[in-house]
Amino acid sequence: MVTAGTDRRIPLNVVVTDKSGKPVAGLQQQDFTALDDKFVT
């Protein structure tokens, strides 16, 4: 839920690993969902 005046962008650097601990390559921004207090942002 975004209301007027609350839109903000926070850069996040993430590393996704598989069960073996190896990095997963090729993920894009659209592969993730950011949550703020359990609400989709």
Image (tube, rainbow, N blue to C red):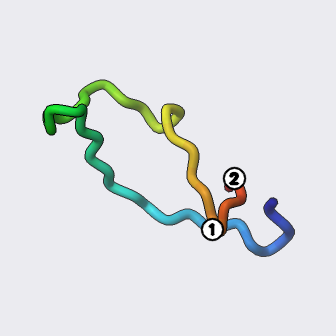
Of all residues, the one furthest to the top in this rendering is: 26
Mark on residue 40?
Answer: 2
Toward the bottom, the furthest residue is 5
| Residue 22 in which image quadrant | top left
The quadrant the N terminus occupies is bottom right
Residue drawn at point x = 47 percent, y = 38 percent: 29
Secondary structure, mark 1, is loop
Q: Quadrant of residue 12?
A: bottom left
* Distance from the alpha carbon under mark 1 to that under mark 2: 13 Å
Circle 2 packing at 10 Å, graded few (<14), some (14-19), many (20+), is: few
On-image quarter of the C terminus: bottom right
17 left or right of 14 in image: left
2 lies left or right of 7: right
The nearer-to-camera label among 1 and 2 is 2
Q: Which residue is mark 1?
A: 8
- Residue found at x 80% / y 62%: 2
**Tag 2's secondary structure?**
strand
x, y percent for residue 13: 32, 55
- Give the mark nearer the N terminus: 1 vs 2: 1
Position in image of residue 6 (x %, y %)? 74, 73
Q: Label 1 amino acid?
A: Arg
Q: Amino acid at mark 2?
A: Val
